[in-house]
Image (spheres, rainbow, N blue to C red):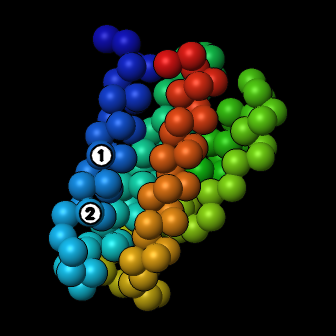
Amino acid sequence: MNFEDEWIKYSKMDLAVAKRELYVDDDENAILTPIICFHAQQAVEKILKAFLVKNNIEFNKIHNLETLRKLSSTVDNEFNNIDFGNLNYYGVATRYPDGIMEMPSVKVTKELYEKAKEIVDFTLKKMNK
């Protein structure tokens, strides 16, 4: 099994779910903002893991984007320029009913989805994919 390709596949699936949920309904009240933000974070987490696997960098079972960025920057220092915004927060906060301080707005959700898409695209280019 090629773990690099599996991480990429799962990253793309998370991004696809986020996009579908973001644009599934014209009624903004029906948009599941925390779930979309979670999948956006997951897409970034998984694409960074794909990059690390491609470059033979070992990592533990971690979810922190900052830690993954630091590891990625040991291969390519352009990863230091990535701005995750609030994506890291939604990787854990949305997993528990008491985790979210307040629901993200549709505007914030769209911004985080776009940020995740940019990071995934950036990383895929770095991987020549």
From the image, tell me which residue sits under label 2: 23
The disc label shown at residue 39, or none = none
Can residue 91 be seen at all in this image of the molecule?
Answer: no
Q: Amino acid at mark 1?
A: Ala
Residue 104 location (% of width, % of height): 43, 80
Left or right: 80 in relation to 93: right
Which residue is more in the foreground, 32 or 102?
Answer: 32
Q: Amino acid at mark 2?
A: Tyr
- Mark 2 lies on a secondary structure that is loop
| In contact (CB < 8 Å): disc 2 and disc 1 | no
Residue 51 falls in which quadrant of the image? top right
In the displayed structure, 22 sits above or below 65; it is below
Residue found at x 53% / y 21% = 53
Left or right: 56 in relation to 27: right
Farthest residue in the right direction?
77
In the displayed structure, 39 sits above or below 6; it is below
- Mark 1 lies on a secondary structure that is helix
Residue found at x 43% / y 70% = 109
Residue 102 location (% of width, % of height): 43, 88
Residue found at x 29% / y 40% = 13
Mark in the foreground, 2 or 1? 2
Q: Residues within 10 Å of mark 1 (few under 14, many from 20)?
A: some
Which residue is more in the foreground, 8 or 106?
Answer: 106
From the image, tell me which residue sits under label 1: 16
Residue 68 falls in which quadrant of the image? top right
Farthest residue in the front direction?
26
Q: Earlier in the sequence, mark 2 or mark 1?
A: 1
Which residue is more in the foreground, 100 or 113?
Answer: 113
Q: CA distance from mark 2 to mark 1?
A: 11 Å
Q: Residues within 10 Å of mark 2 (few under 14, many from 20)?
A: few
